[in-house]
Image (spheres, rainbow, N blue to C red):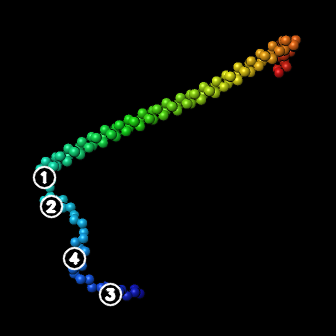
Amino acid sequence: MLPDLPEFANIPASTVAAIGSMRKPQLPMIGSGFSMRSGAAEEAAKYAQEMGIAFGYAKAQKQATANRARALSRAIESQTRRQGRQIAQRGRRAGRYERQADYRTALNEARIRGIGPELFKRARL
């Protein structure tokens, strides 16, 4: 069962009229006789076209800048990768040179001490 609803208070008609006048004014309805002054519609259309061209130009500039930045980023990344490989190769090369120098030094020491190169090579110090 539904509860009983309370009685509504009587509101004077002047208060109701004041509430209706507080609304914001509305724009005229389309097709109501409202129209722009002569030439204003053409000006608005021309202005809108110019704005579209300007926004298109700005968008193209932004896209070109983004493309340039992306290309630069790719170039830097590939250069960094290439340098990393070169550093690794240089490290391997330096290690190889060092091992060869150690081998030559040990071989010379063996010659000086009278150990024959064949014996030295078999020992692989």
Dot 4 or dot 1: first in sequence order is: 4
Q: Amino acid at mark 2?
A: Ser
Dot 1 or dot 2: first in sequence order is: 2
Dot 3 or dot 2: first in sequence order is: 3
Report crowding for label 3: few under 14, some 14 to 19, many 20 or more residues within 10 A (C-alpha). Answer: few
> Label 4 belongs to which residue?
17
Which of labels 1 and 2 is toward the front?
A: 1
Residue shown at 57% from the left, 27% from the top: 83
Residue 66 in percent (x, y) is at: 41, 37
Report crowding for label 2: few under 14, some 14 to 19, many 20 or more residues within 10 A (C-alpha). Answer: few
Residue shown at 31% from the left, 85% from the top: 8
Residue 118 in sight from this viewpoint: no
Q: Could you say which disc has been placed on residue 32 in the image?
A: 2
- The kind of secondary structure element at disc 2 is loop
Dot 4 or dot 3: first in sequence order is: 3
Tell me the CA gap for discs 2 and 4: 26 Å
Report crowding for label 4: few under 14, some 14 to 19, many 20 or more residues within 10 A (C-alpha). Answer: few
> Label 1 belongs to which residue?
37
Q: Quadrant of the C terminus?
A: top right
47 sits left or right of 102 in the view:
left
